[in-house]
Image (cartoon, helix red, strand yellow):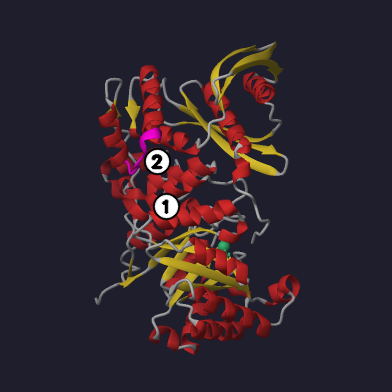
Amino acid sequence: MSDPQMIRIFDTTLRDGEQSPGATLNLQEKIEIARKLQAMGVDVIEAGFPITSQGDFDSVYAISQEIENAIICGLSRCVPRDVQRAGEAIQKAKMGRVHVFCATSKIHREKKLNKAIDEIIRISVESVKQAREYTDDVEFSPEDGSRTELDVLVQITQAVVEAGATTINIPDTVGYAVPQEYGHIFKYVREKLPMLDEKGIYLSSHCHNDLGLAVANSLAAVQNGCRQIECTINGIGERAGNASLEEIVMVMRTRKDYFAKYTNRIDAKKIYSLSRMVSNFTGLSVQRNKAIVGQNAFAHESGIHQDGMLKDRNTYEIMDPLDVGIPESKLVLGKHSGRHAFRDRLNQLGYQPDETLLQRSFEAFKALADKKKDVYDEDIEAILDEQIGQTRVLWELDRFQVTSGSGVIATATVVLKDSTGAKCTEAATGDGPIDAVYSAIQKASGVKVILEDYTTRGVTGGKDAQGEASVKIRHGDRSVRGRGLSTDVIEAAAKAYLAAINRIKSASEATDSGVHL
Ligand code: KIV
Ligand code: ZN
């Protein structure tokens, strides 16, 4: 067989993924995710939508400076100021891309844009030309492409390619397409425009998962000449999310027989830790039965299955969990491990902490090692993710005490310490210990919030396992998430709540321009 075709993996976790409700990431978290994406081998990282806020602009700019081995992409509407912001944000990238989009389907033309197709083509062409002033690498997306008349798609594709677009992405924006139909769009456009292949233009898929078909649609596109797949870690994204990167990669890998014509650069062993990191940072937990990275993805419950597995794993397992980097709970460090050993382990796990982060994480590790006999890689990753999430610690939990029990009103006393070291003590009652602690924290910090979501999970097994709490709180019209870790579940819950409150307090940094998709 001749050389298999290289399929570009375009990750949009930091842009479309971050559009998942409540999934705001801070700058440090975005940089850490981008580093891991680079290490995993993604070809393109869509780092943000620079016009939407100063925070988005800054993160695309910072990631452009940081990442050398992937194309860094900024999204833009077909509006001159948008294109300018996206162009400026990728200015420092070794390989930078501007991605412009304009809706093309009849319903979007008539109801949303109130523009005729000629006008849409005109502004798209103008924007592509403007984007080319910043970079030679320009992607164009006809938004709601899968519901656009095929001839309109051909017309606009021809016009923007002539204007300088080098990648044409045809999105299934509302997750409406079915695989055969979506594949056909790619075939049709290529047949009508032989110049796409002649000029080496990349066709790209971008599928949403409203009907659960995002991965199937992406693969159907590939079989019809698409050479770039847009996807996200854990499939996060608007509404039901985007095509999931880990599923796409593992289908192509596990079914090499079927997809022999194609290859990609992804190191699948990095999938699991990236999935954990994205889940930790966004607060979006991975559904237990999620393919590839869900907690049950490799668990065998039925006796018949377990028996088969013992005889030969291949009876019921089509992938080896080690191939996606699911750790074998290795005991790595203990109470007597020093700072050097700790730093080395972090580097092996793919983190490059600066001195401050290293020091904070090392102190958290030492505190944990005092309480917990065995410290595993998962514990260390959880500590790092927690520390990275806390860019500005305004309030810290100094100590707390709770009384609760059946027939007793739960009462909590908390002592918070602010960044100057000043302490504030408050007490409150509540419906159970966590409610009481949360009320006391609200009183002490002076920040009034509504609790929208609260979950816990054990990071590792055993009696002394670390518990990880994750909360989502609302303050005005803003929802934020926070995580906390501890061997004590109430302390983990208190830390998570405080982390979210700290985020609210420091949120004014990134002023929102009000532009959203
Ligand atoms: O879903 C969509 O259409 C998008 C575009 C901006 C590519 O996210
Ligand atoms: Zn999208």
Contact, CB < 8 Å: mark 2 with mark 1? no
Which residue matches tag 2? 300
Which residue matches tag 1? 34
Is residue 73 toward the left or the right of residue 18 in the image?
A: left
Nearer to us of marks 2 and 1 is: 1
Three-letter amino acid code of the residue under disc 2: His
Please report the bounds of the magenta region as a residue range.
Answer: 349-356
Of callouts 2 and 1, the N-terminal one? 1
In x, y percent, where is residue 133?
A: 49, 75
Residue 213 seen in the current view: yes
Residue 356, numbered label: none
Distance CA(mark 2)–CA(mark 1): 34 Å
Residue 209 seen in the current view: no
| Disc 1 residue crowd, few under 14, some 14–19, many 20+, Cα 10 Å | many
In what quadrant does ligand 2 lie?
bottom right
Residue 1: which quarter of the image?
bottom left
In x, y percent, where is residue 496?
A: 55, 30
Three-letter amino acid code of the residue under disc 1: Ala
